[in-house]
Amino acid sequence: MFEKIHQETFGKSGCRRIVPGQFLAVDPKGRAVMISAIEKQKLVYILNRDAAARLTISSPLEAHKANTLVYHVVGVDVGFENPMFACLEMDYEEADNDPTGEAAANTQQTLTFYELDLGLNHVVRKYSEPLEEHGNFLITVPGGSDGPSGVLICSENYITYKNFGDQPDIRCPIPRRRNDLDDPERGMIFVCSATHKTKSMFFFLAQTEQGDIFKITLETDEDMVTEIRLKYFDTVPGAAAMCVLKTGFLFVASEFGNHYLYQIAHLGDDDEEPEFSSAMPLEEGDTFFFQPRPLKNLVLVDELDSLSPILFCQIADLANEDTPQLYVACGRGPRSSLRVLRHGLEVRSPEAAPEIHNRHVELPFLNLWRDEFDAYIIVSFVNATLVLSIGETVEEVTDSGFLGTTPTLSCSLLGDDALVQVYPDGIRHIRADKRVNEWKTPGKKTIVKCAVNQRQVVIALTGGELVYFEMDPSGQLNEYTERKEMSADVVCMSLANVPPGEQRSRFLAVGLVDNTVRIISLDPSDCLQPLSMQALPAQPESLCIVEMGGAEKQDELGERGSIGFLYLNIGLQNGVLLRTVLDPVTGDLSDTRTRYLGSRPVKLFRVRMQGQEAVLAMSSRSWLSYSYQSRFHLTPLSYETLEFASGFASEQCPEGIVAISTNTLRILALEKLGAVFNQVAFPLQYTPRRFVIHPESSNLIIIETDHNAYTEATKAQRKQQMAEEMVEAAGEDERELAAEMAAAFLNENLPESIFGAPKAGNGQWASVVRVMNPIQGNTLDLVHLEQNEAAFSVAVCRFANASDDWHVLVGVAKDLILNPRSVAGGFIYTYKLVNNGEKLEFLHKTPVEDVPAAIAPFQGRVLIGVGKLLRVYDLGKKKLLRKCENKHIANYISGIQTIGHRVIVSDVQESFIWVRYKRNENQLIIFADDTYPRWVTTATLLDYDTVAGADKFGNICVAEVIMNYHVGETVLSLQKTTLIPGGSESLVYTTLSGGIGILVPFTSHEDHDFFQHVEMHLRSEHPPLCGRDHLSFRSYYFPVKNVIDGDLCEQFNSMEPNKQKNVSEELDRTPPEVSKKLEDIRTRYAF
């Protein structure tokens, strides 16, 4: 958890352009910090420490300058001189007062240095100079004893080094890719950088917008920089930020799509790659060229899934798995993908394991001779026990001391170096020197159930008799003198692990046939005395006591261990899991939580995850109950049904699970703990805009469109043209060489998902229509549209006059220029779906005069929003036939929803308009509209009178102002759906930044009242980390109405215990009751 040390308020009027907070720069020695607004205001704070070494912050010093725009701010490394900040600024005062626009064209950007005079305690503008090119960001150069100080200015096509004093400016052009398909007039800029500094040297890694990383070094001569050197390093996807770690890794936070962690394998000093220098002579306007290539200096180690940006999402159970899947269109350009999200943890199988035939009873494991890794796997069959040793391979051993001719109920490590095997006729205690002690069952009785931990063994004999053994300090197993008769047959038992530093676990849990669980004491003072019991709704199948949810603590000896709570997990035969808190002193059971897991009886197994105990629960699906980041998670595993399992530790997977699934032994590793979904991604070619689901075959029809892009045909044509130019430009003697180079250029194919797609220029569009099978992810059909045709809308429908055929309509704009807006017209492409939804057969295209941005099926015909016209079309032989239109919508139709005779149209900036279609008069009549001007991005119908929508400023509303809520991210899809089988309906939204959230309805006033109070208390007791007022944030555009912030309420679980107690006392509850309410409302609707 972050702990807030200080909070400074510097603007109370919201996020405005003159309120600081857009730029933050720190003096490299940590003495001062500057925050700046986009315009005018800059504040400098001096940081110090008081006598108790607490951080203190001065009052702000102003460095305001009116009429000035700021582009970037960095702290300059000046060693221990007065702290200095460098800013890229532009003064617009003259441009503002000049009506001719001449001054605006001549305004130059300036580089300004601000110095904080620590002696006089104020900030001065030390120095300012105009720049030739327009800069976009600054890089601080190490100074003091580490380097020459100063800054690197990254601007269009150039990188320039500047410093005070006699230092001349050193500038170097940014190299470009050889034979690039990009528009050659287009400038090249660096977009982000990372600095690496050691005692002896430093270098910078800077990335261009195409994704190429250059290693930049400076040559110095006695503190004067003489040249800048650039060397092509590698190409990675475009990043928002990069960070070089001290351990030799490079983290790339991608602007869109997954984030990557690379290991820096080479610094690229000794390879053949050409090095470019500012000292090399070049004509003005010329630049260097390099050849991009696959990774050479970097090795991809890991990637972090990111859904950003989500452009569209639909939720449906297309794979027939009971639980619906989320089909999410995300990414941008060639890195886009269609991802299928399923609720569950991703399971990796690191090693193949042998097949096991025959039925088994139990599958325990053990950990031999206190090694950190397991040594044996014991598999028990109906009539035999198999011992497998784990080494380089898994193989059978016969001299382990185990009895192999009998099934095994349980086996475990006892003490530090002995093993115990419990089988139906007795107990076998195998010492380290292979001596064996046996205890045989009396008379005709056999052992039915047992529970074992590191020092204790408890067995249940037929007839419900319990026998208890404990290990004494010499390593001998001793039977307790008395035995305990239970009132019914024992069906399951569990012992907790022995807590560190103690002799024994104090409690034994026993489940009986009479639908009860009893807690029995094992303390010598009241051994085998019942302490408490709990009645169950069905017969228990298995029990498991675990210690969970503890914070890690260090004891006096520095041993790390966690002090958590004891939980008794009870798996019932009807597929329900109960989790109950076990009081560590009295043994009382309280605070029971219930979850339905599946149709089979629930078996429980204790495993280790993240160094803590967790429970694997197996029913028709396997679930993992674990504590992660101070919250309980109960998540299904995305894997086939398992029957038996145990924890497993080996070098390949220190926290693995070994399990049996349909007669094979599987070794599983769970890595992405805390994740709600696991995802499968299928790559796409351009940015996906929308998709529809064909109801009969469940195939997806996706439209993908990119601006500033070439279609495949244009790309091939441009390549051919460039290759011909290469040959023509060569002299007589170089023809052959040029022809070879041209052939190599035509054959080279660098994957666009890493190297980026060529930028074609403004007004250039590329689109495809794709039919995809969402389960296998294979493309069944792909239709390329021509260059500069951009698909904006898609619908799948049946026409009343065309029998049973399904048709796909795609709305396409021709030659659209976004700013200033102009369009040459549009088309509606009509395709027939053939081969039961696997192929598109082109029928005809219908010209329209504006962009068709929305299409919706309507009463056997189709409604199309063409610009601001709403029209009804029907299918004709040569084209679609216009039947009716309405011209009274304000700006531009962005969406159409239909229900009965009603049509709800969303306008791009005038919110919703309700239209009724009158069949007899063949008229579309507007009968209602919204009072607020909302810039609607997406909408969905909740019922006949109610529509929910979202706008581009991050608000969700239910129209006729039933509710308002500011999400803070642009919402691009809304859908009313159920997320879990048997759950209630909720409203699911997805955002441009990759977020998925739900709005759930309250079904009772009591719940609403309770959560309203929780929210109220948390607003005051647990304010947001960065100090904004929660209520004013959620009411940023419209006052928040009838929505309670569930994310804020769930912060209750991560508050300090005493604060939890205060809040729950105010609500007349206990903390467990409050967190149970929070968990209940979550599991009723979702995960």
Image: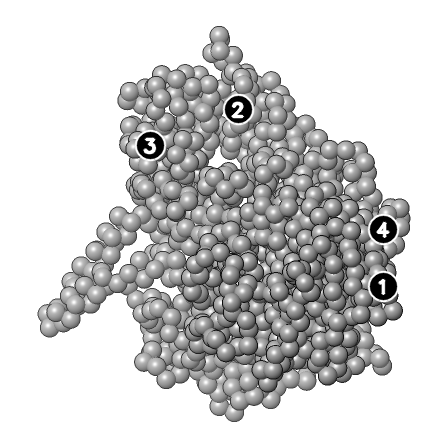
First in sequence, mark 3 or 2: give its number. 3
Look at 22% across and 61% down and name the residue there.
Answer: 747
Name the amino acid type tagged 2. Answer: Thr
In space, the residues marked 2 and 4 are separated at their CA atoms by 48 Å
- Where is mark 3, residue-wise? 836
Numbered disc 2: secondary structure: strand
In space, the residues marked 3 and 4 are separated at their CA atoms by 58 Å
3 is higher (above) or lower (below) than 78:
above
First in sequence, mark 3 or 1: give its number. 1
Residues 888 and 483: in front is 483
Look at 80% across and 73% down and name the residue there.
Answer: 56
Counting other residues with Cα less than 10 Å from the Cα at mark 2, is it few (<14), some (14-19), or many (20 or more)? many
Name the amino acid type tagged 4. Answer: Thr
Quadrant of the drawing holding the N terminus: bottom right
Q: Kindly give the residue lying farthest to the left in the view shown.
A: 732
In space, the residues marked 3 and 1 are separated at their CA atoms by 66 Å
Label placed on residue 898: 2
Look at 75% across and 79% down and name the residue there.
Answer: 472
- Residue 248 is left or right of residue 497, and the answer is left
- Where is mark 1, residue-wise? 585
First in sequence, mark 2 or 4: give its number. 2
Tell me, yes or no, whether the two marked residues, 1 and 4, touch with CB atoms within 8 Å: no
Q: Nearer the viewer, mark 2 or mark 4?
A: 4
Name the amino acid type tagged 3. Answer: Asn
Answer whether residue 567 is visible to the viewer in this image.
no
- Residue 3 is left or right of residue 171, and the answer is right
- Where is mark 4, residue-wise? 1070
- Residue 275 is left or right of residue 241, and the answer is left
Q: Which of marks 1 and 4 is in front?
A: 1
Look at 54% across and 42% down and name the residue there.
Answer: 323
